[in-house]
Amino acid sequence: MKFVDEFRNPELIMKTAEEIRRLTDPQRHYRLMEVCGGHTHAIYRFGLKDVLPENIDLIHGPGCPVCVLPMGRIDDGLSIVAQPNVIFAAFGDMMRVPGAHGSPLEHKARGADVRIVYSPTDAIKLAKANPDKHVMFFAIGFETTAPSTALTLQRARAEGLQNFSVFCNHVTIIPAIRAILDSPDMRLDGFIGPGHCSTVIGCRPYEWIASDEGKPIVVCGFEPLDLLQSIVMLLRQLKNGEAKVENQYKRVVPWEGNRAALKAMNEVFQLRPYFEWRGLGFISQSALRIRDSYAHWDAERRFNIPGIRITDPKAAQCGEVLKGVLKPAQCKLFARECTPESPVGALMVSSEGSCAAFYNYEHRKPVSISNANLAGVV
Ligand code: SF4
């Protein structure tokens, strides 16, 4: 626990918060977007807003893969398990995501063969253990999880596994940030850059944000001190009139990324011309599809996929919350029709969803860095 203790040290946290206050211009209103859902979760979990000046607004970005997946893709995936002898395998955080006719868990309750796996490799094991069935792995995530899906597909091909396929929903982070910056209703001063997917893509892909858009970005870790230190680094840049990419998460993120992971992804995947994002609409070249050389393991080619398009319920304001235009509690359904126990939108399902994080840590269980022993929160 050595590292965790150090990055949650209350004394250092208060010192860093003081530094933030020193760097903040009281006449200015700062809007900093944390791109990654893991950051959103950490911000609420540790009550970091309580130690920030009021004129720093943290805007929650689109970096929760479950939250940005359109409902129709869930229904498309579930249409496969409606076929005989198919097992639907997915990570646990997909299980309660609502489709138009219920979540994977509700389909399971109605008799569909839906299983939770902890890695794509588990899905391969499942296929080997059930040779008379077909296992379809519902793959989801940014560049963080895409390499493990790529390696799994390489293994399936190398072993000639016939009863296994992947329904690919992997998306890429850079086009989403571009869409956010192109959005006319969005004003941002800088970005707390995603820590997880940067372990794969590195820091170079963010350079255009600084050079072309004039916005600073700091790739950031997930502990309280990581986040506060990244805010210090952003404020220093803003104070000096600079815009550059900095890497606060050097202990994990190599500047050039993970070459082996990128190579595996490149061999197995190619960019789709466009892909629909919940709340952001269609974004060109923002998602991955499986290359022709792996077509036999591509569920979209092995099965007849209906290509369902579903709009969110009218009152749900997931899109505005995803773009940071509204705060979770400003959605009309928040904590009324939409709760973690009965989610209407995907932002209320995943622990990285801003609505679920806000509900669990602010609305229901207030935890503040200023009144809690951080070591006890661990
Ligand atoms: S409260 Fe529910 S419906 Fe509203 S934005 Fe959040 S997830 Fe979407």
Image (cartoon, rainbow, N blue to C red):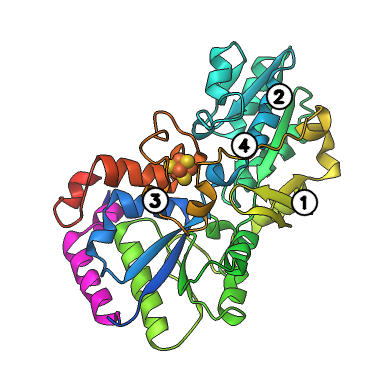
Is residue 12 in view from this perspective? yes
Please give the residue where the numbered disc 3 appears in the rendered image. 330
Seen at 40% across and 54% down, the residue is 327
The answer to which of marks 4 and 1 sits earlier in the sequence is: 4
Nearer the observer, disc 2 or disc 1? 2
Residue 126 spot, x, y in % from top left: 63, 21
Badge 2: few (under 14), some or many (20 or more) residues near its Cα, within 10 Å? some
Q: In the structure shown, which secondary structural element does the residue marked by tag 4 occupy?
A: helix
- Is 7 magenta? The answer is yes
As drawn, the label of residue 180 is none
**In the image, residue 67 above or below residue 198:** above
Please give the residue where the numbered disc 1 appears in the rendered image. 272
| Dot 3 amino acid type | Gln
Residue 322 shown left or right of residue 182 in the figure: left
Please give the residue where the numbered disc 2 appears in the rendered image. 79
Q: In the structure shown, which secondary structural element does the residue marked by tag 2 occupy?
A: helix
As drawn, the label of residue 71 is 4
Res 221 → quadrant: bottom left
Badge 4: few (under 14), some or many (20 or more) residues near its Cα, within 10 Å? many
Segment colored magenta: 2-24
Q: Marks 4/3: CA distance?
A: 22 Å
| Dot 1 amino acid type | Arg
